[in-house]
Amino acid sequence: MQPDTSAIPIDPCKHCGTGAPVDVHFCPRCDRILTLGRHGDYFTFFGLRRRLRLDLNDLEQRFRALSRLFHPDYFHNSSSTERLASLERSSYLNDAFRTLRDPMARLEYLLKLEGFTPKESHDATTKVPQGLLEEVFELNEELEAIQDMRAEGASAAAIALRLSAARRPIEANLARHEEQLHARMSEHDARLEAGDPEGQREALAELRTLLLERTYLMNLLATVRREVSAGEAAAS
Amino acid sequence: MAYSDKVVDHFNNPRNVGSLPKQDPTVGTGLVGAPECGDVMKLQVRVNPDTGVIDEAKFKTFGCGSAIASSSLATEWLKGKTVDQALAIKNTDIVAELALPPVKIHCSVLAEDAIKAAIADYKQKQEAGQAS
């Protein structure tokens, strides 16, 4: 599907002054590579709509095609403006590809684009469900108890057993979150296709909460993994 | 960035660490967290139901030095205050007392949220007690 270009602002070509939409990479009149001044976003750069579920093969093909077009080698003999433009577009393209190919980075990026990043972390803290907080608190207490066990010289096997028991509910919770995230992403895209901005924002708000909770769980799991490797280091 | 002496002091000698019985009708529990940094903070108050004065305050925080210091300081301040005075404690008071740098202000916000949550829990228990 073609992106809706009607609302995209116009940026003039530095060479001939022709106006070009920001999602166009080469001047429609003189065909020169356009300076990357005011530009759209990672999605428009690839000619994509702001969808959360992307076909990765398609994305990679677009990436390869664009990187060939922008490659600095082709601008070796061009003006310095064009050489700079090719560098800027190549580097922006790499950033855009790195972000869009990872579903979670893509989601975070879209949330930022749509203004869903809280100004202060405080805004977000109140939204964590109490059940999750309790889970996080209890696991932290359990980890503390495991650290005490280690300090008191408990066997590595006993510690490993308790650690694996502690991580299981977190991993299960994370898997549930992953499923919900993907379901909401599909929901968002369906609303986008249906031209329902309100429904889209609703889905994004839910995604923002889910993503925050996921960060919490990931942080916890990282702590558990540190404990596990500390145990392995001590055992060897 | 270095921690202020007061933060280091509260971190090394945290006051009032521990738990109060959660089910006790005179105990209010506040559990709050900041997913971005993984911090989680539990703050509890025991209120004398006749005077409305906080007799005891306990906390347990898993997080950075500033989060621990903020909650430790909060429990010190809470003791001897009435429930309404406790609600008047602002995160900016904690920031000023501990000389927290801008990146750690959210720790003081967390402590204020914990106080409010604990008092709200206590009030809710009192109302439920009167209703039955």
Image (cartoon, coloured by chain):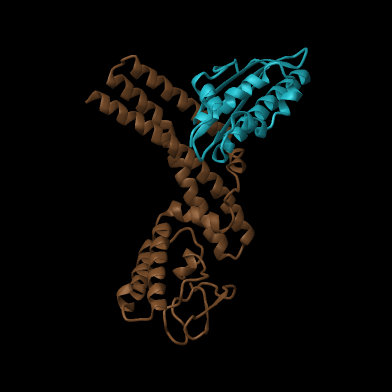
The colour of chain B is cyan
Where residue B53 sits, quadrant-wise, is top right
Where residue B44 sits, quadrant-wise, is top right
Residue A31 vertical placement versus A93 (above, below): below
In the drawing, does residue B111 fall left or right of residue A220? right
Q: Quadrant of the C terminus of chain B?
A: top right
- For the question of whether residue A227 can be seen, the reply is yes
Residue A98 vertical placement versus A140 (above, below): below
Picture coordinates of residue A156, whole percent (x, y):
28, 21
Picture coordinates of residue B84, whole percent (x, y):
76, 24
Name the residue: 52% across, 57% down. A110
Name the residue: 39% across, 65% down. A91
Q: Chain drawn brown, letter?
A: A
Name the residue: 51% across, 74% down. A22
In the drawing, does residue A67 fall left or right of residue B59? left
- For the question of whether residue A55 can be seen, the reply is no
Picture coordinates of residue B104, whole percent (x, y):
55, 37
Name the residue: 33% across, 69% down. A64
Between A48 and A181, which is closer to the camera in this rendering?
A: A48
Between B103 and A4, which is closer to the camera in this rendering?
A: B103
